[in-house]
Amino acid sequence: MEEYQQSVLYVEDNELNMVLMHHIFKKHLPSVLLLKAETAELGLEIASYRVPDLIIMDIGLPGMNGYEAMDTLKSDESTRHIPVMAISAFAQRSDIEQAKATGFAAYITKPFQVKVFTHIVKELLAGDPYTP
């Protein structure tokens, strides 16, 4: 049985993106357990009882979007300390500024470079603030 040192919760409604992320973690971050949720509501539930070291949150989710989920995470005593990285196809400057104002630790746009993505994840897992 594999020993995981840290865990990351990935909240994403697109199945192909889930598969891609699974492969990225397996190859580039093998000591990190990847938890998955298809909706923000399920992600919040998992975050409250698993308390991952990092959350990667899609912004354009059905139902509750990533911004609303972030507000909920930050208002909950048990999850407010968890860094959250936004991941989205929304790439306008206003989108990035809104994410920063909401409290996301990092914002990465789809499609992304795997090397850049894994670097950001490693920084956030190490407790370092991400600075682009």
Image (cartoon, grey):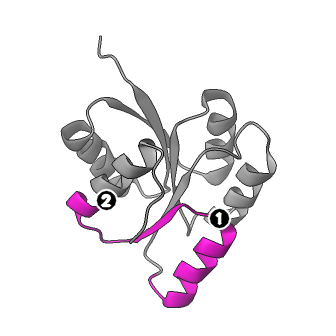
Residue 37 visible in rendering: no
Residue in the foreground of this view, choosing between 84 and 127: 127
Q: CA distance from mark 2 to mark 1?
A: 19 Å
Place of residue 113 in the rendered image (x, y in percent of width and height, measured from the top left): 23, 66
Q: Judge from the rendering whether residue 76 lies leftward or rightward of residue 18; answer left or right.
A: right
Q: Residue at x 49, y 55 (%)?
A: 12
Residue 47 visible in rendering: yes
Residue type (three-letter) at the residue carrying disc 1? Gly
Q: Residue at x 62, y 63 (%)?
A: 66
Secondary structure under badge 1? Answer: loop
Q: Which residue is mark 2?
A: 117
Q: Is residue 66 above or below residue 42?
A: below
Secondary structure under badge 2? Answer: helix
Q: Which mark is residue 103?
A: 1
How many numbered markers are drawn?
A: 2
Q: Residue at x 56, y 67 (%)?
A: 59
Q: Quadrant of the C terminus?
A: bottom left
Residue type (three-letter) at the residue carrying disc 2? Phe
Query: Along the polypeptide, which appears first: circle 2 or circle 1?
Result: 1
Range drawn in magenta: 91-117
**Magenta highlight on residue 48:** no
Place of residue 123 in the rendered image (x, y in percent of width and height, measured from the top left): 38, 51
Q: Residue at x 72, y 63 (%)?
A: 68
